[in-house]
Image (cartoon, rainbow, N blue to C red):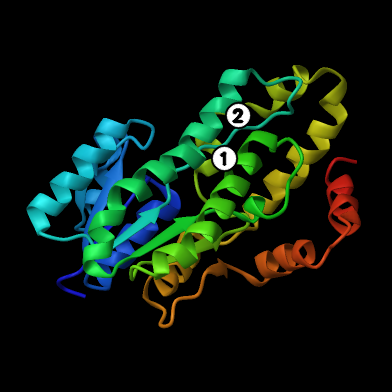
């Protein structure tokens, strides 16, 4: 892999940081990007080339991708990992919160992918996008986040057969709960969120109690990174990857639940 160049978004912590380390260890020339380079100390320590990229800023995306191609002469893979959490139900969220979730988690993925495609066509490259089990199963108090991840799944599933005709592989990776800083980075104060939830407070309390426990017992970022690397290198390419047995069971229940009753029954248990 010594001549192969991979660009990864959202690498300051968690999954992105672990993937950058794994890509470097596998011999890729690894470009690790993040919105704020001041937070890049940990990823620099992996040996990756750290660059600024804000997925919500088209100029930032264009400048980063063109800079990588100018410096390395090629781009072989993009790993879309940057994301942001939004906790709350529609009545209590501002529209700005919902739009922000779509900008980071969906439109940012589209912008990076769109900008990289000509270079991936030239190299016969690959796009691997970190979605979530929340891109298949809608979850309480995650309307905005799941909407964005559902959109990513639909976009990539539709793109995959078209991209294949020009030699570009497309895959999505669906983690469940991961013991990273993702929840902390969402800026959620559980006590305050419950206090401000009004009639939804009992359901939100039940959801937060259940979810904090799930993240405590979740996978490590390194476990997820190992699956992402398999998605990056598998021949022939496989479109959809879950990162654990739990994620496979959770997603599988939805895909076989034609009338939606099984998923609705499970989700009801999360808020009661």
**In the rendered image, is residue 204 in sight?**
yes
User: Left of 174 or right of it: where is 160?
Assistant: left
Q: CA distance from mark 2 to mark 1?
A: 7 Å
Q: Residue at x 47, y 36 (%)?
A: 104
81 or 192, nearer to the observer: 81
User: Left of 153 or right of it: where is 171?
Assistant: left
Circles 2 and 1: CB atoms closer than 8 Å: yes
- Percent coordinates x, y for residue 198 in the rendering: 83, 17
Q: Is residue 235 above or below residue 26?
A: below
- Percent coordinates x, y for residue 207 in the rendering: 78, 40
Local secondary structure at mark 1: helix
Q: Residue at x 28, y 39 (%)?
A: 61
In the image, farthest residue toward the bottom: 235
Please tell me how crowded label 2 is: few (under 14), some (14-19), or many (20+) other residues with Cα within 10 Å: few
Identify residue for label 2.
Answer: 188
Residue 168: quarter of image: bottom left
- Percent coordinates x, y for residue 119 in the rendering: 23, 57
Question: First in sequence: mark 2 or mark 1?
Answer: 1
Q: Residue at x 57, y 54 (%)?
A: 153
Please tell me how crowded label 1 is: few (under 14), some (14-19), or many (20+) other residues with Cα within 10 Å: some
Q: Quadrant of the C terminus?
A: top right
Identify residue for label 1.
Answer: 183
User: Left of 68 or right of it: where is 110?
Assistant: right
User: Left of 60 or right of it: where is 207?
Assistant: right
């Amino acid at each position: 892999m010594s001549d192969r160049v991979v660009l990864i978004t959202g690498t300051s912590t968690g999954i992105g940081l672990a993937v950058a380390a794994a890509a470097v260890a596998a011999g890729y020339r690894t470009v690790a990007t993040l919105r704020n380079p001041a937070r890049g100390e940990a990823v620099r320590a992996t040996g990756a080339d750290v660059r600024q990229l804000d997925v919500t800023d088209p100029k930032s995306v264009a400048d980063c991708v063109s800079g990588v191609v100018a410096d390395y002469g090629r781009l072989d893979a993009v790993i879309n990992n940057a994301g942001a959490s939004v906790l709350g139900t529609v009545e209590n969220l501002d529209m700005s919160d919902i739009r922000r979730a779509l900008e980071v988690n969906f439109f940012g993925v589209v912008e990076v992918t769109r900008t990289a495609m000509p270079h991936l066509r030239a190299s016969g490259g690959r796009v691997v996008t970190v979605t979530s089990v929340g891109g298949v199963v809608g979850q309480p108090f995650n309307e905005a986040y799941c909407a964005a991840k559902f959109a990513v799944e639909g976009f990539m599933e539709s793109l995959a057969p078209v991209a294949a005709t020009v030699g570009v592989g497309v895959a999505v990776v669906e983690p469940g709960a991961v013991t990273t800083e993702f929840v902390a980075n969402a800026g959620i104060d559980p006590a305050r969120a419950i206090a401000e939830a009004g009639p939804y407070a009992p359901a939100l309390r039940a959801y937060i109690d259940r979810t904090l426990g799930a993240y405590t017992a979740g996978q490590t970022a390194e476990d997820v990174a190992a699956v992402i690397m398999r998605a990056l290198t598998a021949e022939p390419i496989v479109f959809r990857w879950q990162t654990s047995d739990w994620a496979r069971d959770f997603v599988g229940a939805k895909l076989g639940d034609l009338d939606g009753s099984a998923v609705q029954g499970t989700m009801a248990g999360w808020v009661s």
